[in-house]
Image (cartoon, rainbow, N blue to C red):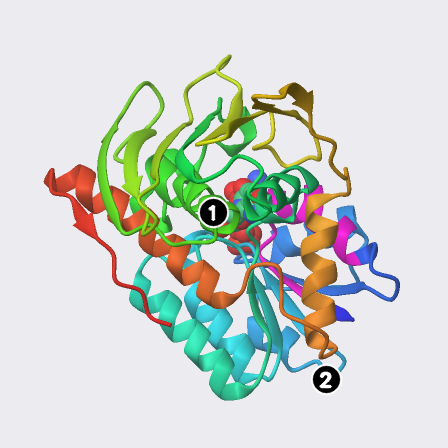
Amino acid sequence: MNWVLIGASTIARDYMIGAIRAQGAGRVSWVVSGSQERAAEYARQNDIPGATSDLDEALRDPSIDAVYISSTNEKHQSQAIAAIAAGKHVLCEKPLSTTIEGATAMVRAAKAAGVVFATNHHLRCAGSHRAIRSLIRDNAIGRVLSMRVFHAVHLPEGLRGWRLDNPDAGGGVIPDITVHNADLVRFILGEDPQDVAAQMGVSGMGKGVEDSAMSVWTMPSGAMVMSHESFTHPFAGSGIEIHGTEGSIFAKGVMGQDPEGEIEMVTAAGRKPVPFDNHNLYDESVRRFCEAVAGDGTPAATGLDGIKSLQVAMAVRTSARTGQRQTLKYEE
Ligand code: NDP
């Protein structure tokens, strides 16, 4: 498959170009940046033949099958709509848009045009989270009572730009990390949060946007979820815990971009490690996307997953702003 990168970004450079090229015939033919100079430099550094600041120029290339969008969040919507109008399949970064309406418009446009649209929620592609999801589905810990997601990181120096000071570009920890937590909880528990109560704050990095949030979600099954995300915690580590009537699952170091961490399950029978596959998360996301384009199955995270996970994140922010519990209503 032949791709355009929309956004000369860190995530494309560090993970996605490799993931695209790992798919047999996967090629990256263009990079599109807001600046021609930056596009040219990025193309040179990453061995990409085409560089432009004119999205339409790249979209006019008839050899292009798909676009990967990893620009700042406020640009995703218009870029996706343009790519869809040109008949290209779209793999878009999270959050899909800065608004629910924007995300919904993107997904509807893709459906109307008959192109594949996917959201790059990488965590659900991890072997660790898939192993946990299987345990839950197989009833290994009984009925789930509660889940705790701890995802407070120390934002790397190189990413301390728009995320920390630009609300218009979709900055803040809620669109950045809460949206991932929402997607992961939905994936693992197989249900969508119903009610959300939240608080957020600025704890040393955010300038005009929140850099930390904590929230509690209730699920249709009655399970309660606690989600903590931050940019400012150097030594917190990440992970999830799921507690059921017959056991608990403890997963440490599993919320990053690489296949890492460890999982233990505790039941009346004792404590045992849970093995999991350690494939590359982004390779898996691109592989599933390519299969969907070939007419085989669905992407790992669909457009609807992107919308619903964004709805949860937005509800967290609204609840934190207003002090009011938010009830979610999802489009199917
Ligand atoms: P970056 O800040 O690296 O890139 C975003 C945009 O900022 C680029 O498209 C580029 O604009 C501009 N930019 C980047 N570096 C420079 C620079 N040195 N000088 C000038 N402009 C620069 O963001 P990320 O890669 O961290 O994130 C991009 C998107 O991907 C976001 O939507 C984010 O939420 C998502 N993301 C997803 C992850 C996942 O695991 N699913 C992980 C990380 C991010 P231009 O293209 O116009 O040149």
The local crowd at label 1, few if under 14, some if 14 to 19, many if 20 or more residues have their Cα within 10 Å, is many
Work out which residue is located at the far front of the displayed protein and give it.
268
Image coords of residue 35 (percent x, y):
55, 56
Q: Which residue is mark 1?
A: 189
Q: Which residues are magenta?
A: 4-20
Work out which residue is located at the far right of the displayed protein and give it.
24
Tag 1: amino acid: Leu
Do the residues bearing badges 2 and 1 touch, measured as CB atoms within 8 Å? no
Q: Quadrant of the C terminus?
A: bottom left
Task: Let me know if residue 65 appears in the view.
Answer: no
Using the image as rendered, state which of residue 248 and residue 184 is in the foreground: 248
Using the image as rendered, state which of residue 88 and residue 322 is in the foreground: 322
Q: Which residue is mark 2?
A: 62
Q: Is residue 254 left or right of residue 173?
A: right
Can you say whether 166 is above or below 214 in the image? below
Alpha-carbon span between mark 2 and mark 1: 41 Å
